[in-house]
Image (tube, helix red, strand yellow):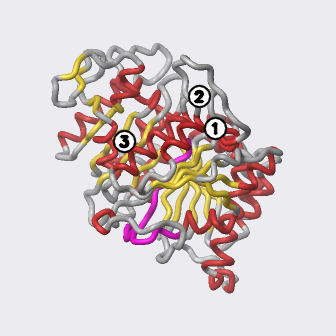
């Protein structure tokens, strides 16, 4: 059974693949050198990469193919591709398959309708920590429908879960709240709102739970909230019936459970015991899977960086051990000294980080190689954000915080 798996649906840069490559080297050389002693690669993979959408271009891009070849040269690594998305994009992966024919898979399992289903393959990994079935799977959606293909991916994930007799949760955050807008009527695309209603109906007929929770703050900012009944329940007249707009706390309550939660770009990592990097959490919180949020976007062009920090604070407040890592373009959030005109309704991300740093269950890190690659340095005033390299990143990924007994951690890319 696979110990660790990544799901990527967005573009995969050489930079991202390179730090993933280095973290895998750390895993094999520092933590599990015995795996390097075997010439034959075992049938069960230790690391599996599930690729769909724009991530598939990295298998043909001459800048990223050499990194994939290094990754595939390590023991027990496998890539599973979304065959229908490969066909749609006209992507050829023959070069990688010729050298690694048992490790690069471009054929998917068949769904009940007899068609290949990448998401049925994803579901095999998403349910591996909850036995016996039925179990629960969750998906965090942060992008709007129609502009972003990830909305269709989220729908296919939920459909595959119900088809596999799993209960399903959809967590709509940031622009993801638009998935539940009432009256969607696209002329040239699958209707996401109708699809979600059908998933809910199928789940109910099979006696499965289907929850669709939208963040109240994100919904209110986008005009969904109409009134509050005094009990913290926001009622909206512009969302489909299964969609429930709730305080972010109610969404985070779902993250306290042990099921796998994925996103467009995410990972589930099984953890070794004895990680030294975090202080001991309260004993009653030890079973909650920790979460690592990778801030990969520039600070002010989108809401992603601020949304990641807000989400991290909410998780930490509920007793979930939470690590935020500024990496790739996310390191620009820490560069120089950010200044904001008085009276503006915008936010200074550095001030936000400084205000919440030191909170219980919450830690901030910055990946030094990302700073160096961009020729920038961290604002020295942000001393609560700890500098890390590959060894420390490996520790964060593969060891749990002290006192955590959960068998996996969630990694979500913002």
The residue under label 3 is 158
Q: What's the distance in space between the residues labelled 1 and 2, CA to CA?
A: 8 Å
Of pointers 2 and 3, the one earlier in the residue sequence = 3
Q: Secondary structure at mark 1?
A: loop
Q: Relative to residue 141, is residue 364 depicted above or below?
A: below
The residue under label 1 is 297
Q: Residue 10, position in %: x, y?
A: 61, 40
Q: Secondary structure at mark 2?
A: loop
The residue under label 2 is 302
- Residue in view at x 68 percent, y 54 percent: 367
Q: What's the distance in space between the residues labelled 1 and 3, CA to CA?
A: 27 Å
Marks 1 & 2, CB-CB < 8 Å contact: yes
The quadrant the C terminus occupies is top right
Residue range (magenta): 399-414
- Residue in view at x 76 percent, y 61 percent: 69
Q: Is residue 211 visible?
A: yes
Q: What's the distance in space between the residues labelled 2 and 3, CA to CA?
A: 27 Å
User: Would you say 7 lies left or right of 160 here?
Assistant: right
Q: Residue 181, position in %: x, y?
A: 35, 20
- Residue in view at x 50 percent, y 30 percent: 143
């Amino acid at each position: 059974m696979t110990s660790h798996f990544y799901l990527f649906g967005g573009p995969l840069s050489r930079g991202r693949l390179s730090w993933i490559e280095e973290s895998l080297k750390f895993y094999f050389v520092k933590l599990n050198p015995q795996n390097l002693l075997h010439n034959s690669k075992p049938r069960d993979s230790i690391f599996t990469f599930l690729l769909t959408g724009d991530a598939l271009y990295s298998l043909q891009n001459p800048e990223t193919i050499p990194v994939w070849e290094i990754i595939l040269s390590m023991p027990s690594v496998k890539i599973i591709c979304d065959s229908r998305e490969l066909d749609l994009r006209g992507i050829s992966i023959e070069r990688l398959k010729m050298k690694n024919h048992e490790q690069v898979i471009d054929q998917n399992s068949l769904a009940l309708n007899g068609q290949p289903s990448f998401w049925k393959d994803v579901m095999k990994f998403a349910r591996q920590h909850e036995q016996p079935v039925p179990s629960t799977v969750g998906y965090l959606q942060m992008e709007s429908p129609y502009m972003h293909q990830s909305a269709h991916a989220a729908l296919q994930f939920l459909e595959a879960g119900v088809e596999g007799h799993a209960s399903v949760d959809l967590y709509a955050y940031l622009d993801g709240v638009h998935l539940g807008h009432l009256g969607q009527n696209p002329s040239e695309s699958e209707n996401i709102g109708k699809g979600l209603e059908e998933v809910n109906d199928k789940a109910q007929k099979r006696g499965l739970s289907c929850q669709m929770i939208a963040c109240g703050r994100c919904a209110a900012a986008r005009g969904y909230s109409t009134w509050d009944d005094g009990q913290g329940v926001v009622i909206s007249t512009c969302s489909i019936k299964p969609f429930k707009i709730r305080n972010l706390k109610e969404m985070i309550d779902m993250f306290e459970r042990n099921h796998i939660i994925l996103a467009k770009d995410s990972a589930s990592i099984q953890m070794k015991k004895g990680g030294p990097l975090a202080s001991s959490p309260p004993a009653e919180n030890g079973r909650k899977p920790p979460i690592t949020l990778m801030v990969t976007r520039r600070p002010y062009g989108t809401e992603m960086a601020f949304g990641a920090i807000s989400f991290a604070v909410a998780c930490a407040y509920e007793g979930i051990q939470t690590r935020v890592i500024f990496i790739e373009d996310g390191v620009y959030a820490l560069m120089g000294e950010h200044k904001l005109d008085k009276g503006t309704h915008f936010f200074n991300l550095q001030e936000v980080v400084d205000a919440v740093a030191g909170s219980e269950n919450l830690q901030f890190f910055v990946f030094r190689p990302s700073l160096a690659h961009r020729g920038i340095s961290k604002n020295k005033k942000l001393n609560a954000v700890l500098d890390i390299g590959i060894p420390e990143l490996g520790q964060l990924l593969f060891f749990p915080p002290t006192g955590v007994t959960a068998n996996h951690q969630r990694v979500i890319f913002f």
